[in-house]
Image (cartoon, helix red, strand yellow):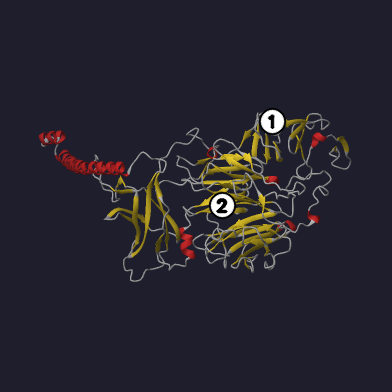
């Protein structure tokens, strides 16, 4: 039973002053007492709620009720701060973030510019721009843009909560990304409609009502790669639906150890019984269908069991024994079936819950008959959580661990920690958006990150011969129309702005001036990006050579070479002026450094949201702009001649004034009139 004690002699003697239930409710999880800095009889109890006493702890009342629509403060409080000289100023840290009050809890301000979300899983759709999905610790499931065709950065308001609970995995429907499936604790699965909120439960049941299903806190869910109406969900069994979750059938036996010694939550829930589903054990964590072979599925459990079926669940084989070096009963955290090779898969396991912080990751090439360990403690600093290989270049792999992100370009033989702008943080899940070749990273504490355009990594993984320069295939560029952000244009610093992808065509290139090309006798301090249509050179961009070896970026605004514009001054700039916007199509891009060249192509498309413009319309506009440009060239020639003549006249005028103003009075007057 909860009780509150008080000492007035530094802890030598204690007196019980309260043993009522309003002190706290989950002492194993949170049980904190704070005393007002200006009033020793004002005491705060920090737990699911915040209760406050004004009589030294004899009685309490709620300061911040849970789910109170009036103050909007998230429950489950873990951290509390009271200003040492001003008890009205307090800071609250809870499962939803950080809140500040300046009036002793009457009103609160949520601090919305701290990107500290905790993602369990990460996923993407195929919209343009595409969206990122994920479930957050006690903050529901969310959908938000990977990049936004709006001015400024990606605001919090662009993200939509699509269901609540402890958010875990989100699976968007590829047929229509308005819909999909979100999951929360205790095996609750919803078919969501993010536009209307018309969500409904599709949680599987067992045909035998006497069978109690065991769902992991973070249960397994997946969609069949060959049929988007087919879903898989895991308890201790594999459940399958072929009608988008409306009905389910069990297609496996119990694929865990089913050890009764690990199923005593109701018996061993502690002095204060507390079992919320996070304690469920002997459950399925992973269901991974193959994308290259129908009816092949892998499963992994939280007690070390790995199974495979090659016939859609009619029979299952235990393939756990080949995981050499993995302690029995470890958690099988992820299995990733190859998207290009039959029988190939990657597996990640961990055992940190038993204080074993070693890293475990394996590969099979024969459906799990044998496994090869590809990650251990010599490769990384902490335990492994997730893994992914590039769908087109399998030598390129990324690994998420409790201490950050690692990359391998030789299929896991060697691993390097990736720290270029990325923090040391627990990396929970990884996804690759294949159309745009992006790596999307879900972290547990630093929200979601995107590594744009993996083309350089793919090239390294292919072990292509190194030259001083290498221009990589860029993603498709769009003539995107940019709106102003929702809400105020001027958000100042209290409004979070996630980094947005800039407009224009984005090129990445490798540069190393120490690598001299064969027979390269032309030395240069500049590097050039030249754009060609199917007939001729249309644009030349130049830049100083980069100072550092590595991957660099270059933007092209998708405009041709232009002409000098009419001006009051003589144009002395050596930079090529920007001209008319190019038409949608495919263009050739050539990077030049000295005698060395590297070539690729880029596809440019119209904004897919704009459907009233035909190619004929755009061509007509282009032709009109070229005619206008020709007129501009003529006028520019005239104004440049005028500017040159004016400059000569001013020079002549100064010479005459300096020589003899009286003698040249008439000439000065006529020159002034000119």
Distance (Cα) linking label 2 and label 1: 36 Å
| Mark linked to residue 105 | 1
Picture quadrant of residue 287: bottom right
Along the line of sight, which residue is nearer the eye, 42 or 127? 127
Instruction: Determine crowd level at label 1: few under 14, some 14-19, many 20+ residues with C-alpha closer than 10 A.
Output: some
- Which is nearer the N-term, disc 2 or disc 1? 1
Indicate the position of residue 255 as horizontal and vertical percent values.
71, 58
Element at badge 2? Answer: strand
- The reply, left or right, for residue 654 in relation to residue 591 is left
Which corner quadrant holds the C terminus? top left
Q: Residue at image x 49%, y 32%? A: 488
Q: Specify the quadrant of the image occupied by residue 607.
A: top left
The percent coordinates of residue 218 (x first, y second) are 67, 50
Residue 126: give x, y in percent of width and height: 49, 48
Front-lying residue, 189 or 409 = 189
Neighbor class of circle 2 (other Cα within 10 Å; few <14, some 14-19, many 20+) is many
Residue 276 at x, y = what percent? 74, 44
Dot 1: what SS?
Answer: loop
In which quarter of the view is residue 430 placed? bottom right
Viewer can see residue 528: no
Tell me the quadrant of the picture where the N terminus can be found: top right
Camera-near label (2 vs 1) is: 2
Q: Is residue 663 above or below residue 359?
A: above
Left-right relation of 446 to 466:
right
Query: What residue did someone put label 2 on?
Result: 441
Give residue 168's mark.
none
């Amino acid at each position: 039973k909860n009780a509150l004690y008080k000492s007035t002699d530094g802890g030598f003697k204690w007196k019980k002053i309260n043993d009522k239930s309003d002190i706290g409710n989950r002492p194993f999880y949170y049980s904190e007492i704070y005393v007002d800095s200006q009033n020793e009889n004002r005491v705060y109890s920090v737990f699911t709620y915040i209760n406050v006493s004004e009589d030294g702890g004899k009685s309490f009342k709620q300061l911040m009720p849970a789910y109170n629509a009036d103050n909007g403060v998230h429950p489950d409080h873990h951290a509390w701060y009271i200003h040492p000289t001003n008890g009205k100023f307090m800071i609250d840290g809870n499962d939803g973030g950080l809140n500040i009050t300046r009036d002793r809890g009457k009103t609160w301000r949520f601090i919305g510019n701290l990107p500290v979300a905790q993602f369990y899983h990460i996923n993407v759709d195929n919209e343009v721009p595409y969206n990122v999905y994920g479930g957050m610790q006690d903050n529901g499931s969310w959908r938000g843009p990977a990049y936004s065709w709006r001015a400024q950065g990606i605001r919090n308001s662009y993200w939509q909560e699509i269901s609540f609970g402890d958010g875990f995995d989100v699976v968007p429907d590829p047929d229509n990304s308005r819909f999909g499936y979100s999951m929360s604790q205790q095996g609750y699965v919803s078919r969501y409609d993010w536009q209307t909120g018309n969500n409904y439960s599709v949680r599987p049941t067992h045909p035998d009502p006497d069978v109690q299903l065991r769902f992991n806190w973070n249960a397994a869910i997946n969609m069949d790669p060959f049929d988007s109406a087919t879903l898989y969900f895991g308890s201790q069994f594999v459940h399958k639906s072929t009608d988008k979750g409306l009905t389910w059938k069990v297609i496996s036996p119990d694929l865990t150890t089913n050890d009764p010694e690990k199923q005593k939550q109701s018996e061993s829930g502690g002095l204060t019984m507390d079992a919320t589903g996070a304690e469920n054990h002997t459950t399925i964590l992973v269901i991974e269908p193959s994308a290259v072979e129908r009816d092949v599925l892998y499963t992994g459990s939280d007690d070390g069991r790995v199974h495979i079926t090659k016939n859609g669940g009619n029979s299952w084989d235990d393939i756990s024994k080949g995981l050499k070096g993995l302690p029995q009963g470890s958690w099988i955290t992820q299995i990733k079936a190859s998207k290009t090779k039959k029988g190939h898969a990657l597996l990640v396991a961990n055992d940190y819950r038993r204080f074993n912080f070693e890293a475990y990751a394996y590969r099979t090439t024969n459906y799990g008959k044998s496994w090869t360990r590809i990650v251990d403690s010599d490769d990384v600093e902490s335990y492994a959580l997730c893994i992914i290989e590039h769908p087109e270049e399998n030598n390129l792999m990324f690994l998420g661990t409790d201490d950050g992100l690692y990359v391998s370009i030789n299929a896991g033989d060697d691993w390097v920690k990736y720290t270029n702008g990325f923090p040391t943080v627990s990396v929970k899940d990884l996804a690759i958006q294949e159309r745009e070749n992006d790596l999307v990273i879900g972290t547990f504490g630093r929200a979601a990150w995107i590594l744009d355009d993996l083309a350089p990594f793919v090239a390294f993984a292919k072990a292509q011969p190194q030259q001083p320069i290498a221009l990589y295939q860029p993603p498709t560029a769009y003539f995107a129309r940019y709106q102003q952000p929702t809400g105020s244009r001027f958000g100042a610093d209290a409004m979070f702005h996630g980094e947005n992808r800039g407009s224009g065509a984005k090129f990445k290139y490798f540069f190393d001036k120490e690598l001299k090309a064969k027979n390269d006798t032309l030395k240069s301090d500049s590097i050039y990006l030249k754009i060609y249509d199917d007939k001729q050179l249309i644009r030349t961009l130049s830049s100083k050579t980069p100072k550092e070896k590595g991957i660099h970026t270059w933007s092209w605004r998708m405009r041709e070479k232009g002409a000098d514009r009419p001006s009051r001054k003589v144009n002395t700039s050596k930079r090529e002026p920007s001209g008319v916007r190019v038409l949608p199509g495919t263009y050739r891009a050539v990077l030049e450094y000295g005698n060395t060249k590297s070539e690729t192509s880029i596809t440019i498309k119209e904004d897919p949201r704009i459907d009233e413009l035909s190619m004929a319309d755009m061509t007509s506009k282009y032709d009109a702009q070229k005619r206008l440009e020709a007129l501009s060239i003529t006028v520019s020639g005239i104004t440049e001649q005028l500017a040159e003549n004016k400059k000569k006249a001013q020079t002549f005028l100064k010479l005459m004034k300096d020589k003899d103003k009286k003698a040249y009075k008439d000439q000065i007057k006529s020159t002034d009139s000119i």
